[in-house]
Image (cartoon, rainbow, N blue to C red):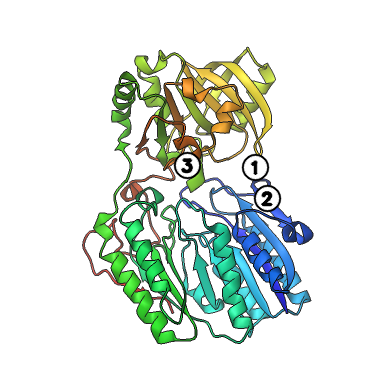
């Protein structure tokens, strides 16, 4: 048997004006995709299929750091590549690794659009897809795939396991088994910082999901949390169930899971400490005074790993207004601002010299404004990083150390600071453009809290300008005719 494999993986923040372009995307094709190994869904799919002597026909895997919507022409060109391979090969099944919340300029959802085109080529073979836990399910997706399976952990530590499960579902169908799927839409928006799976209520909800998954005839249950920083008609949470051909059981189980989730909606709160921006300075100084250093603070409204622009200056301005923060020794360090123009100016003047220009708000000037700087360049580094490389500069902004990047990258890795000669354990305060702390940086903190700043990844969802999302939806609306609806 032969199976077509590939994937598109991106969280697209529609409130971020940056357009995701080719330079932002990493693509594996052909043999590079086949030989790719790691803790990701694609590896799980390929290894599971090949272990059963299935011939894998590779297309491509395209991934990018969460950002704004994709450039239409870029998506169309990648889609064309996938479809040309699909048309050129007779296959028995399709197994994809998709995100579920990828958005394209002028088109909208990527997943439904791609699946619809693949279904036109392959009207009668099984199509199964792995999804991110923060996927958004649409009617078009349900109409054009036989089954979906999503991650069960946040932070996501079961990506490869999910790929294995997707491949197993496809193998079930290829070996004569049936796949019946049902999805129930829950009118609920929630950020990851309120829905980590190791804390309540998600801990109990996912325990229920796993227990129900053990029922006879139930092949898979996924609770897909949606992506709150995308304004789309299909936004919200979805319970999706796959059974061995029993549609009635799939419907019943999906509705039960959806109702269980909905009844816990008021239990979703920030599990970690939070502060409004204007109260954050006092809390930083209080924790420093207690010796709980380093204090790690998340600038959550401008989190690039949630798709924000990584150039919002709101919280830096507040820190610069405090003489106590500016006098910290060693200085508070801020990771990091995406500003390619200032970055190149830093390299132009060189280490130890003074750079003049504007910092921040280079891409998004609606949510903040640039800060005029006359700063000493303390350290420079070219090509830092692994898959997503960026140039780095460490500059002194009036007593605060600020990292500047040439690319839009995640700010969760301590190694970014370390590569610039920063000893995090000796710093009293560290600010990262992030939401919940990733394990690597959490391990280095003595205390931490999240600042509820504004931006494209604003944690206070009621402040975002939603226009397309169906109303009523919790928590934007606290009253209304809320409905749990099957996606058919």
Q: Marks 1 and 3: CB-CB under 8 Å?
A: no
Q: Is residue 229 above or below residue 427?
A: below
Q: Secondary structure at mark 2?
A: strand
Tell me the number on the disc at residue 26.
2
Q: Is residue 175 above or below residue 167?
A: below
Q: Secondary structure at mark 1?
A: loop
Q: Position of residue 133 (x, y in %)?
A: 47, 60
- Compare marks 1 and 2 and give the one earlier in the sequence: 2
Instruction: In this rendered view, identify the residue nearer to me: 379 or 187.
Output: 379
Placement of the C terminus among the 4 image quadrants: bottom left
> Viewer-nearest of labels 1 and 3?
3
- Crowding at dot 2, Cα within 10 Å, few <14 / some 14-19 / many 20+, comes out as few
Q: Which residue is mark 1?
A: 388
Q: Quadrant of residue 319?
A: top left
Q: Marks 3 and 2: CB-CB under 8 Å?
A: no
For the residues marked 3 and 2, what is the alpha-carbon distance in whole angstroms?
22 Å
76 relative to 404 in the view: left or right? right
Q: Which residue is mark 3?
A: 438
Q: Marks 1 and 2: CB-CB under 8 Å?
A: yes
Please give the name of the residue rendered at 43% of the width and 72% of the height, measured from the top-left corner: 240
Placement of the N terminus among the 4 image quadrants: bottom right
């Amino acid at each position: 048997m032969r199976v077509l494999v590939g994937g598109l993986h991106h969280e697209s923040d529609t409130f971020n004006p940056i357009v995701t372009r080719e330079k932002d995307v990493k693509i594996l094709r052909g043999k590079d995709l086949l030989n790719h190994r790691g803790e990701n869904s694609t590896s799980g799919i390929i290894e599971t299929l090949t272990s059963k002597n299935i011939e894998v026909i590779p297309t491509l895997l395209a991934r990018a750091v969460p950002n704004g919507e994709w450039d239409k022409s870029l998506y169309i060109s990648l889609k064309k590549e996938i479809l040309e391979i699909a048309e050129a090969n007779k296959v028995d099944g399709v197994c994809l690794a998709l995100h579920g919340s990828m958005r394209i300029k002028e088109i909208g959802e990527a997943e439904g659009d791609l699946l619809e085109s693949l279904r036109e080529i392959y009207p009668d073979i099984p199509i199964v897809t792995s999804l991110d836990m923060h996927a958004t399910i649409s009617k078009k997706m349900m109409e054009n795939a036989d089954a979906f399976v999503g991650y069960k952990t946040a932070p996501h530590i079961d990506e490869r396991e999910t790929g294995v499960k997707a491949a197993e579902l496809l193998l079930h169908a290829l070996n004569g088994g049936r796949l019946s799927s049902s999805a129930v839409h829950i009118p609920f928006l929630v950020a990851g910082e309120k829905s980590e799976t190791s804390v309540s209520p998600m801990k109990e909800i996912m325990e229920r999901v796993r227990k129900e998954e053990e029922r006879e005839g139930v092949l898979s249950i996924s609770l897909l949390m949606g992506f709150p920083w995308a304004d789309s008609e299909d936004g919200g949470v979805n319970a999706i169930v796959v059974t061995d051909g029993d549609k009635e059981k799939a419907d019943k189980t999906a509705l039960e899971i959806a109702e269980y989730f909905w009844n816990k909606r008021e239990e979703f709160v920030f599990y970690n400490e939070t502060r409004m921006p204007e109260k954050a300075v006092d809390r930083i100084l209080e924790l420093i005074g207690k010796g709980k250093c380093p204090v790690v603070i998340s600038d959550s409204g401008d989190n690039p790993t949630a798709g924000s622009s990584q150039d919002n200056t709101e919280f830096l301005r507040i820190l610069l207004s405090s003489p106590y923060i500016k006098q910290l020794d060693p200085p508070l360090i801020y990771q990091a601002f995406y500003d390619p123009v200032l970055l190149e100016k830093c390299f132009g003047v060189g280490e130890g010299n003074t750079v003049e220009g504007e910092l921040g708000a280079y891409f998004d000037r609606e949510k903040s404004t640039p800060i005029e700087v006359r700063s000493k360049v303390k350290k420079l580094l070219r090509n830092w990083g692994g898959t997503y490389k960026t140039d780095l500069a460490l500059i002194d902004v009036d007593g605060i150390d600020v990292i500047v990047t040439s690319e839009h990258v995640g700010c969760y890795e301590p190694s970014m600071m370390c590569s610039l000669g920063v000893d995090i354990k000796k710093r009293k305060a560290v600010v990262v453009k992030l939401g919940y702390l990733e394990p690597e940086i959490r391990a280095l903190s003595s205390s931490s809290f999240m600042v509820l700043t504004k931006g494209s990844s604003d944690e206070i969802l009621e402040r975002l300008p939603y226009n397309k999302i169906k109303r009523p939806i919790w928590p934007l609306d606290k009253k209304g005719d809320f409905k749990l609806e099957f996606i058919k």
